[in-house]
Image: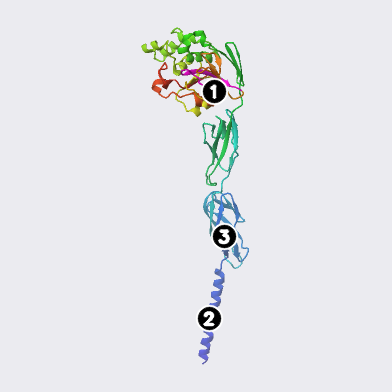
């Protein structure tokens, strides 16, 4: 009996010892508990991590796996940098009987919404303004109506012709910001740089912001029947050139010696078009604008001839040229429109400016009159827009309008920007 009692006591002691060892080991293995959730934020946002520990107020440190996406400071404040994901490692130091511990969370960074600020704009023809747009990222600009206004890479808008069009402004998409598009209206108005003019006998003085030009007007009656058949284009050359320092009569241009660099025959020979057929046409047909352009070039007068034109483009080009203080030779058809027949046949005139009422100032070479419709001998007042739209046709056949003389309705249209 005594032996049994001793064994029971021994086993109880051993059990108690084992329990004490287990409890001690369990206590020794216990770690700090860290509670923190994954985070979603934007690339320009700051966000405080919410971390709790057991036991409370354990000392924490933080590290980011990708500082280009998100950074974290010693207090757990997150700062977004660009779109992406990164791991934040939270380390809790040992506290009391609690061992150190580590927890990793995921931070997802999204792009930030972009903004573009810009207001509708007004600009005058021939002037430039800034779009004054602002965005979070670099901006690009696109004109929805290049015939009305142009825009460069820096947002400088230049008025081309009157009207309203859209300007599209795009903010670039980056790792930090989404892309953004904004559209504004750009209204282009005419630049009020009208001119004044005064005729004194055979001379017309035209004054404007770009200076003063004096045109020598050669009347058709001076050259008799020749002018009726041949002289409107040659006369237009004489009138336009006279204001630009090269005053030659229509007769001198038409019948000038072959070696005269301003003569019709010299120009046609230079173009390689002086053929037997052209000799027959020389006294009977009007020259084309192509030949007129070559004559002006031979006179060392800068010019640009336009044959097959788009009317809105023609209006813009002609107005801009006039506002620069330079003349334009225009070809009119012979149809009656709104009671005005500008030409008996196809007829060249010299457009020298726009008056203070917005009407064009036209010189008729065959009559020597201002704003006279030769077809039905009526005086007219007309805007450049109406003249181009109602009384001008483009030349439509390059194989014809590249000839030296007018031989068909297909090569009678167009205009020359002179100077």
Residue 137 vertical placement versus 331 (above, below): below
Residue named by callout 3? 91
Is label 1 or label 2 in front? 1
Q: Earlier in the sequence, mark 1 or mark 2?
A: 2
What's the distance in space between the residues labelled 1 and 2, CA to CA? Answer: 112 Å
Instruction: Label 2: state its secondary structure.
Output: helix
**Residue 5 in view of the camera:** yes
Residue named by callout 2? 15
Residue 61 vertical placement versus 385 (above, below): below
At 42% from the left and 24% from the top, the residue drawn is 396
Label 1: how many Cα within 10 Å (few below 14, some 14–19, many 20+): some
Label 3: how many Cα within 10 Å (few below 14, some 14–19, many 20+): some
Magenta stretch: includes residue 343:
yes
What's the distance in space between the residues labelled 2 and 3, CA to CA? Answer: 38 Å
411 relative position to 46: left or right: left
Is label 2 or label 3 in front? 3
The magenta-colored residue range is 340-355
Residues under numbered marks 2 and 3 in contact, where contact means CB atoms less than 8 Å apart: no
Residue named by callout 1? 321
Q: Position of residue 205 (x, y in %)?
A: 60, 15
Q: Position of residue 2 (x, y in %)?
A: 52, 91
Q: Position of residue 30 (x, y in %)?
A: 56, 68
Instruction: Label 3: state its secondary structure.
Output: strand
Is label 1 or label 3 in front? 1
Nearest the viewer among 222 and 254 is 222
229 relative position to 54: left or right: left
Label 2: how many Cα within 10 Å (few below 14, some 14–19, many 20+): few
273 relative position to 193: left or right: left
């Amino acid at each position: 009996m005594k032996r049994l009692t001793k064994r029971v006591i021994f086993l109880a002691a051993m059990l108690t010892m084992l329990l004490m060892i287990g409890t001690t080991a369990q206590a020794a293995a216990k770690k700090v508990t860290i509670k923190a959730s994954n985070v979603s934020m934007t690339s320009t946002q700051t966000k405080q991590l919410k971390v709790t520990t057991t036991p409370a107020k354990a000392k924490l440190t933080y590290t980011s796996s990708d500082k280009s996406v998100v950074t974290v400071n010693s207090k757990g404040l997150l700062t977004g940098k660009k779109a992406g994901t990164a791991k934040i490692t939270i380390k809790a130091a040992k506290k009391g009987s609690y061992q150190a511990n580590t927890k990793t969370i995921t931070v997802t960074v999204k792009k930030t919404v972009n903004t573009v600020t810009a207001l509708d704009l007004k600009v005058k023809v021939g002037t430039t303004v800034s779009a004054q747009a602002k965005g979070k990222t670099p901006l690009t600009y696109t004109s929805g109506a290049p015939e009305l206004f142009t825009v460069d890479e820096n947002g400088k808008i230049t008025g081309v012709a009157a009207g309203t069009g859209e300007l599209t402004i795009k903010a670039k998409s980056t790792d930090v910001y989404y892309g953004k598009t904004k559209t504004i209206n750009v209204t282009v108005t005419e630049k009020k740089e009208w001119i004044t003019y005064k005729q004194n006998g055979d001379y017309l003085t035209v004054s404007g912001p770009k200076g003063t030009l004096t045109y020598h007007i050669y009347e058709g009656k001076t050259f008799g029947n020749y002018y009726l058949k041949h002289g409107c284009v040659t006369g237009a050359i004489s009138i336009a050139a006279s204001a630009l320092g090269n005053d030659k009569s229509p007769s001198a241009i038409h019948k000038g010696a072959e070696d005269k660099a301003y003569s019709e025959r010299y120009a046609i020979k230079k173009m390689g078009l002086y053929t037997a057929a052209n000799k027959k046409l020389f006294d009977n047909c009007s020259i084309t604008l192509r030949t007129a352009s070559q004559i002006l070039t031979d006179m060392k007068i800068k010019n640009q001839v336009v044959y097959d034109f788009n009317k809105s483009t023609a209006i813009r080009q002609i107005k801009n040229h006039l506002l620069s203080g330079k003349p334009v030779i225009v070809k009119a058809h012979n149809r009656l429109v709104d009671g005005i027949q500008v030409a008996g046949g196809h007829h060249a005139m010299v457009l020298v400016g726009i008056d203070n009422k917005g009407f064009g100032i036209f010189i008729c070479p065959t009559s020597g009159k201002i704003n006279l419709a030769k077809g039905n001998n009526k005086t007219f007042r007309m805007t450049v827009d109406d003249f181009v739209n109602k009384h001008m046709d483009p030349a439509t056949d390059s194989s014809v309008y590249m000839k030296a003389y007018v031989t068909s309705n297909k090569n009678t249209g167009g205009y020359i920007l002179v100077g």
